[in-house]
Structures are given as structure tokens and as C-alpha cells.
């Protein structure tokens, strides 16, 4: 019996060691994609809580994260139910993960509003109220809370350049990457021009620059092609106004706006 016990123990140890050595416990860079039937999958947090790694999805839901066998991945976003996934050997072999998330339905319970002895005087009531600290992703310590969400044009470009080697080559061959680069650059220029316009009230354009209100957008695009205007910091409001003063005279002349 003792010999049989030792024999079975050896067989068990052999099988266990064979299984263990057959598994890969090294770290790999996994590419994946988050999918959903209804919602935008961009900016979904992907957390490897086993290795303290984190990533965030692009506009199309693509992401890349470092993981090893049996690591636990958490997929989290406000609009989705949190999903947990354990890295398997199949995932490591294919180096890819596809995850479908379910929309999170937020339902509020019945709310009863109490007067709490409000006086109707805003200043007095505000001083009497006990307001806690503002809750944000940063104050909660959420991963990537300070990451600025890219505009859609920049996210499309990022997806074209980082959606996998095959997609990257195809986009380069077809010219899609070049087109997206040009489109993203134009959108950044457009957002900058809109930001500058919003810094000045329309009456300043009409009264000071003598630009009709319906022509303001066209005038801003006229300024946009000026090299001095394009390289001036958007926060330098005085310099921008000086440039627009000069450009307004040229714009009025080109469009015969000073003609009675």
C-alpha cells in the first residue's frame, strides 16, 4: 500500500508540473475592443486590478493593456454596467479581447423635497446650508480621471493609427490616415477660431469692427488664414483684437461693406 501511495503521489506531481509549465505566466500586451449595442464606447476605463495597470478606450472602443494569465480585468464606464473578466490562455494566445458591455439603466427613487426652514433670502439660505465637497472623478481617485477626452476627429485619427497593425497598414495604403490627419487639423483650427469668437461679444464686431452680424463667421475664417492671427495665443485677447482691427478694414474693403 505504501508503494502504491508513493506511486500515485509521483503521478500527481508529474501531472501538476506538466500543466504548470505548459501555462504562460509572463506579461503580454493585449489589444482589445469594447462593444455595445446602444451607447458610445469611447473613454471606457479598462483596469487590470491584479497588476495595477489601466487603459482607456478610443472612439471605436479599442484599447491596449498589459496582462498575464489569470489577471482580473475590470471594464467600467458611467453608461455601462461594470464587467469583470479573467485573462485566459486563449486570450494570451490570440493577444486580443472582445468585450460586450450592457447599458446601465439608472432609475431614481421617489424624491421628497423638504423646505428645511428656508427663508427665501438667497444669501441667508446659502450660508445656512451645509454643502459637502464637490464630488468628481478626481476627488474619488478614479483612474485616468485627469485624462482629457479627445474630440471626435482626433479620436478617429487615433483609431486609424492604433487599431492594430493590419488596420494601420490599410489606412495608410488607402489614404484614410492622411485624410483624417487633415480633417483633425481643420477641426482644431475651427475650434480655435470659435473659441476666439466666443471671447468677444457680437456687438464689438458690429460696433467697433463694423462687421455685420451675419458676416461675423465669414470674417473669422478670413482672419484664420492670416499667419500672425494663427500663431497668436488664444489667451492674448489684446493682440488678437489688434489683428482683427487691421483685418476688419481689409475685409470690409474686399466685400464693399463701406460703400454707401
Image (cartoon, grey):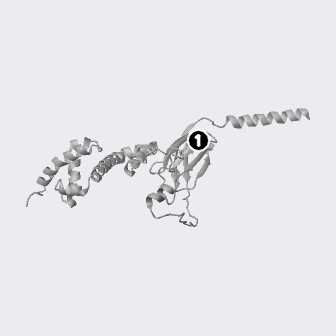
Near-viewer residue (107 or 139): 139
Q: Is residue 113 left or right of residue 9?
A: left
Quadrant of the image containing the C terminus: bottom left
Q: Position of residue 64 (x, y in %)?
A: 51, 43
Q: Which residue sits at x=11%, y=53%?
A: 253
The residue nearer to you, when weighing 137 against 78, is 137
Q: Position of residue 101 (x, y in %)?
A: 55, 55
> Height in image: 251 above or below 164?
below
- At numbered mark 1, what does the secondary structure look like: helix, strand or loop? helix
Residue at 21% x, 60% y is 213
Mark 1 is surrounded, within 10 Å at the Cα level, by few (under 14), some (14 to 19) or many (20 or more) other residues, namely many
Q: Which residue is mark 1?
A: 92
Task: Return the x and y of residue 224 as percentages of the image width and height.
Answer: 23, 48
165 sits to left or right of 208 = right
Residue 30 visible from this viewpoint: no
Residue farthest to the right?
Answer: 1
Q: Quadrant of the N terminus?
A: top right
Question: What residue sits 41% from the left and 45% below the top?
Answer: 158
Residue 65 higher or lower than 126, as above or below: above
Q: In this view of the protein, can residue 207 be seen by the observer?
A: yes
Question: Where is residue 48 drawn, in percent x and y?
Answer: 58, 42
The tally of labels here is 1
Amino acid at each position: 500500500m505504501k508503494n502504491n501511495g508513493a506511486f500515485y503521489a509521483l503521478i500527481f506531481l508529474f501531472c501538476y508540473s506538466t500543466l504548470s509549465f505548459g501555462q504562460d505566466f509572463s506579461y503580454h500586451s493585449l489589444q482589445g475592443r469594447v462593444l455595445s449595442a446602444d451607447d458610445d464606447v469611447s473613454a471606457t476605463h479598462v483596469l487590470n486590478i491584479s497588476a495595477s495597470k489601466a487603459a482607456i478606450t478610443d472612439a471605436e472602443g479599442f484599447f491596449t493593456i498589459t496582462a498575464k494569465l489569470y489577471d482580473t480585468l475590470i471594464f467600467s464606464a458611467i453608461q455601462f454596467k461594470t464587467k469583470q473578466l479573467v485573462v485566459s490562455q486563449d486570450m494570451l494566445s490570440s493577444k486580443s479581447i472582445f468585450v460586450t458591455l450592457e447599458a446601465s439603466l439608472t432609475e431614481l427613487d421617489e424624491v421628497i423635497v423638504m423646505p428645511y426652514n428656508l427663508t427665501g433670502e438667497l444669501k441667508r439660505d446659502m450660508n445656512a446650508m451645509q454643502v459637502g465637497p464637490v464630488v468628481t472623478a478626481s476627488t474619488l481617485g478614479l483612474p485616468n480621471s485627469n485624462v482629457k477626452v479627445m474630440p471626435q476627429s482626433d479620436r478617429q485619427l487615433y483609431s486609424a493609427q492604433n487599431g492594430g497593425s493590419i488596420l494601420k497598414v490599410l489606412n495608410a495604403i488607402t489614404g484614410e490616415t492622411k485624410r483624417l490627419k487633415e480633417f483633425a487639423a481643420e477641426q482644431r483650427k475651427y475650434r480655435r477660431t470659435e473659441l476666439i469668437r466666443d471671447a468677444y461679444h457680437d456687438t464689438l464686431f458690429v460696433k467697433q469692427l463694423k462687421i455685420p452680424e451675419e458676416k461675423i463667421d465669414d470674417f473669422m475664417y478670413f482672419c484664420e488664414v492670416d499667419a500672425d492671427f494663427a500663431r497668436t495665443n488664444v489667451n492674448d485677447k489684446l493682440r488678437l483684437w489688434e489683428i482683427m482691427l487691421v483685418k476688419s478694414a481689409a475685409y470690409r474693403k474686399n466685400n464693399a461693406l463701406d460703400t454707401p
